Amino acid sequence: MALIFVLGLLTIFSSVNCRIIEYVQQPLGKQLFLSRRIVTDSSEFDGGVLVNENGIIEAVLERDVVNSLLTQNLDDLKIIDGGNLALMAGVVDSHVHVNEPGRNPWEGYVTATQAAAAGGVTTIIDMPLNSIPPTTTLKNLKTKAAAAKEEVFVDVGFWGGVVPGNQEELLDLIKAGVVGFKCFLTDSGISEFPMVTRNDLAEAFAVLNGSGTVLAFHAELSENNQGAECSGSDCPDPILYSTYLASRPDEMEIRAVSLVASFLPQTDVHVHIVHVSAEGVVPILEQARDERIKAGYKGWRGGVTAETCHHYLTLSSEMIPPGHSEYKCSPPIRNITNKLKLWEYINDKRLDLVTSDHSPSVAELKGPNFMTAWGGISSMQFDLSLFWTEAKARGHSLSMASHYLSAGPARLAGLQDKKGAIRPGLDADFIFFDPDASFLVTPQVIRYKNKISPYMYRVMTGKVMRTYLRGQLIYADDELIDGPKGKLLLNEGFSY
Ligand SMILES: *[C@@H]1O[C@H](CO)[C@@H](O)[C@H](O)[C@H]1NC(C)=O
Ligand SMILES: *[C@@H]1O[C@H](CO)[C@@H](O)[C@H](O)[C@H]1NC(C)=O
Ligand SMILES: [Zn+2]
């Protein structure tokens, strides 16, 4: 047992009401993280978290236990005291489009995962589309993983894709370790990732039945199965947001979710609806869940879950200025009544997780025309601050943020025994968060590749001060620490 006790570097890390004093020791041994506010997904308490040499949480301790521990022999223990800063599980963002390889000018693993680290996001799950190739075959997954493997600053998992004709690939992708699959019920906007028809879906459900995987849906469906866009002189002014909003009404989401629900009696596959915008889909999903549970389904949340995104909880259609397509995403941001209803569902735990749907593009694809601009909002770097800005103003707790941003997405991705909470046996993916600090979003602050944001020059409440990945400091004092330390979350035996 090494008893080297190096009180080498003493760093004092201060903010308004706290400081972190850190005794840096070589080599990295056991660590004890202290905070007056340790946040779990159901409570907060004053105490410490003991982390072993492998970056795994060994024990979660109340303050009196910490105090008695501190009177003992601490020779090889490094103490990191966050004072009044909240110690929270790192955010898990299960909906991120990294775009690499193939659309590197849009985003990439280095910039996306650096933005993640700065935002306290310690795990991202990459969506199967917008990269070329898309993650629809095992070979394509290998191409993608090879592009990512030396470059990631946080841990990265992968969704596979269901597209017409790739049923044969799905079980191999599961074996390789994809967290689940995503498909589109409407045009994805990306020609390499075509939407599925009812028949394609029936085939995919048949192949996936019994596999224990998740099938996630971009749930918009227009009546004639075509885009709702108009043409020529019939079109209302495309510079106005209301024109775009009218082209993708609530009914498209409701129709899609009803189609998904109609498959449930014949399958045991967990279905998940990504980026719910229209509040009206929530009761439909709840009914589907109830029926499934009554029919004997035993899995998490009756195998029916849904996420919403920060932009639907932060923005509303009334405030979107003409020509500002940095606000464009699909499904669209709806009106204030809809936003308030989504918060009601968040309050009542009737939604399961909140994600960014970080979907960047180059500036040339944006422009003032809402109908032709690329639909996608980049915000993963601000996940927690965005949610907290709204949640705090509504009197919610940090535990609620952990529930929706860490525990929920980790559970969806099947990572609940590794990620998303402060609990013995899980990875020590932590953040120190100052819930009372505020900061301004500026191009200089943004670390993702294209500095486009509907939140530009907005003030955010709550700031990530430090980020730890498996016990290792990866971000502090507005700076990234060292090179990439992230891992790809694929199954053992996966070969590139
Ligand atoms: C799906 O799998 C379940 C067992 O998990 C089985 O009871 C059911 O019959 C299967 N459905 C189909 C359509 O194969
Ligand atoms: C918001 O949109 C819904 C559905 O489109 C509509 O029924 C409602 O009246 C709208 N509310 C406001 C305040 O515009
Ligand atoms: Zn998306």
Image: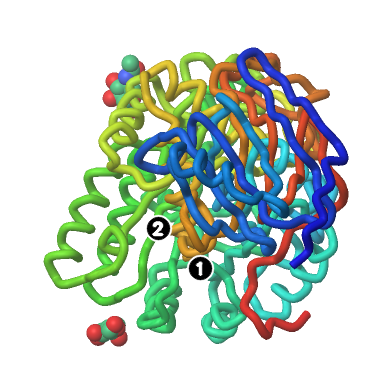
Q: How is the image coloured?
A: rainbow
Q: Are marks 2 and 1 in contact (CB under 8 Å)?
A: yes
Q: Amino acid at mark 1?
A: Gly
Badge 2 marks a residue whose secondary structure is strand
Label 2 belongs to which residue?
A: 272
Q: Quadrant of ligand 1?
A: bottom left
Q: Residues within 10 Å of mark 2 (few under 14, many from 20)?
A: many
Label 2 and label 1: CA atoms lie apart by 10 Å
Query: Could you tell me which residue is drawn at 68 percent across and 64 percent down?
Result: 54
Q: Earlier in the sequence, mark 2 or mark 1?
A: 1
Q: Amino acid at mark 2?
A: His
Name the residue nearer the viewer: 279 or 385.
Answer: 385
Query: Could you tell me which residue is drawn at 43 percent across and 16 percent down?
Result: 393
Label 1 belongs to which residue?
A: 180
Q: Residue furthest left?
A: 294
Is residue 377 shown to the viewer in this render? no
Query: Could you tell me which residue is drawn at 48 percent across and 38 percent down?
Result: 47
**Residue 8 vertical placement versus 193 (above, below):** above
Determine whether, in the image, residue 269 is placed left or right of residue 370: left
Quarter of the image for the N terminus: give it: bottom right
Is residue 381 shown to the viewer in this render? yes
Name the residue nearer the viewer: 405 or 56.
Answer: 56
Name the residue nearer the viewer: 41 or 356.
Answer: 41
Picture coordinates of residue 197, whole percent (x, y):
44, 67
